[in-house]
Image (cartoon, rainbow, N blue to C red):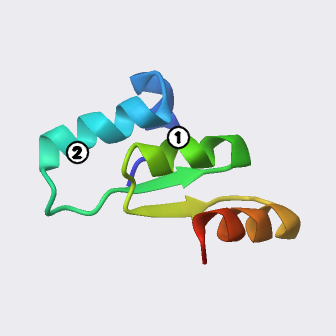
């Protein structure tokens, strides 16, 4: 699970995901916690397997789910 402190240390969500993927390979699922919609595209493009939507409004949750395709 990649959390906000991991993202901050890495310098961004995409970087954190790519580093984790390089370390664990493709057989381990990578989950990323986000709390803003502007982070969503970056984590999806970087290859996150799961996105945890933390402390978002109901409208923000609905938009995130719609953008993910769920």
What residue did someone put label 2 on? 21
In the rendered picture of this protein, how many numbered marks are placed on residues? 2
Q: Position of residue 29 (x, y in %)?
A: 27, 63
Corner quadrant of residue 20: top left
What residue did someone put label 1 on? 42
Residue at image location 14% in from the left, 40% down from the top: 23
Q: In this view, does 10 lie above or below 6?
A: above
Q: In this view, does 13 lie above or below 35?
A: above
Q: Where is residue 18 in the image (x, y as percent from the top left)?
A: 29, 37
Q: How crowded is mark 2: few (under 14 residues within 10 Å), some or many (20 or more)?
A: some
Disc number placed over residue 55 in the picture, else none = none
Q: Which residue lies furthest to the bottom in this view?
A: 70
Camera-side residue of 47 and 60: 47
Quadrant into which the C terminus falls: bottom right
Task: Classify mark 2: helix, strand or loop.
Answer: helix
Residue at image location 40% in from the left, 25% down from the top: 10
**Mark 1–mark 2 CB contact (< 8 Å):** no
Q: Can residue 45 be seen in this view?
A: yes
Relative horizontal placement of residue 62, taking residue 16 as reference (left or right): right
Task: Classify mark 1: helix, strand or loop.
Answer: helix
For discs 1 and 2, the disc positioned in front in the rendered view: 1
Q: Can residue 3 be seen in this view?
A: no
Residue at image location 37% in from the left, 62% down from the top: 49
Residue at image location 26% in from the left, 34% down from the top: 19
Relative horizontal placement of residue 35, taking residue 10 as reference (left or right): right
Question: Marks 1/2: CA distance?
Answer: 15 Å
Q: Which of marks 1 and 2 is nearer the N terminus?
A: 2
Quadrant into which the N terminus falls: bottom left
């Amino acid at each position: 699970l990649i959390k906000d402190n991991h993202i901050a240390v890495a310098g961004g969500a995409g970087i954190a995901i790519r580093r984790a993927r390089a370390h664990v390979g493709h057989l381990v699922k990578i989950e990323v916690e986000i709390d803003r919609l502007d982070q969503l595209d970056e984590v999806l493009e970087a290859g996150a397997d799961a996105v945890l939507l933390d402390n978002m409004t109901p409208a923000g949750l609905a938009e995130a789910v719609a953008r993910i395709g769920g």
